[in-house]
Image: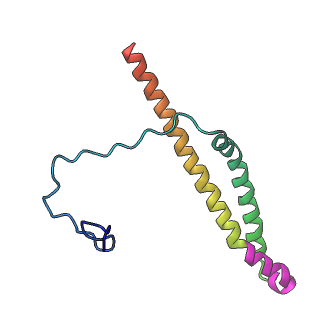
Amino acid sequence: MKGAYSHGSARNPTPPRPGAEGPEQRPVERPAPRRKLSFNEKRALETLPERIGQLRRDLEALERKLADADFAAREPAEFLNATKNYPELREALASAEDDWLGLEILREEVETTVEELSLRSRRTD
């Protein structure tokens, strides 16, 4: 097939031979993070903690309802609704926590990069 991979295929790549690393392997440098957070990222960092708190409170309330042994018999429609909402609520909480964590890591990288650049500029002055 013309235009196909010239060295192996995507499905069966040729594994590197032991000892054939080639010239000295240098660690791959990660690209420098952006210098500042976007408006939306800053806003999310401000609002996500409250959203996470609210999701936790909602989840705790739902768990208390579901822990009641008579809940299903007493309110079958509400019980079905609660069991349907429970995994959705847990997923929403996990997603919000993941978003917050990713943004916090990015914020720390940006602050560290800014501090490093500031220190470098002081050394050269």
Q: Nearer the viewer, residue 106 or 5?
A: 5
Query: Colour scheme in the image?
Result: rainbow
Q: Residue furthest front?
A: 2
Q: Quadrant of the C terminus?
A: top left
97 left or right of 62 in image: left
Tell me the quarter of the picture where residue 10 sits. bottom left
Position in image of residue 89 (x %, y %): 70, 67
Q: Residue at x 41, y 41 (%)?
A: 31
Was residue 79 drawn as part of the magenta stretch in this picture? yes
Residue visible at 22% across and 67% down in the picture: 15
In the displayed structure, 27 sits above or below 97; it is above
Residue 99 position, x and y percent, is 60, 53
Horizontal side of residue 108 vs 69, given as left or right: left
Farthest residue in the left direction?
19
- Residue segment shown in magenta: 71-85
Residue positioned most to the bottom: 73
Q: Quadrant of the N terminus?
A: bottom left
Count how many numbered circles sit on residues in the image: 0
Asked whether the viewer can see residue 56, the reply is yes
Identify the residue at horizontal 30%, vertical 67% (top origin). 5
Whether residue 67 appears in this view of the structure is no
Q: Where 33 falls versus 73 (above or below)?
A: above
Q: Position of residue 32 (x, y in %)?
A: 43, 38
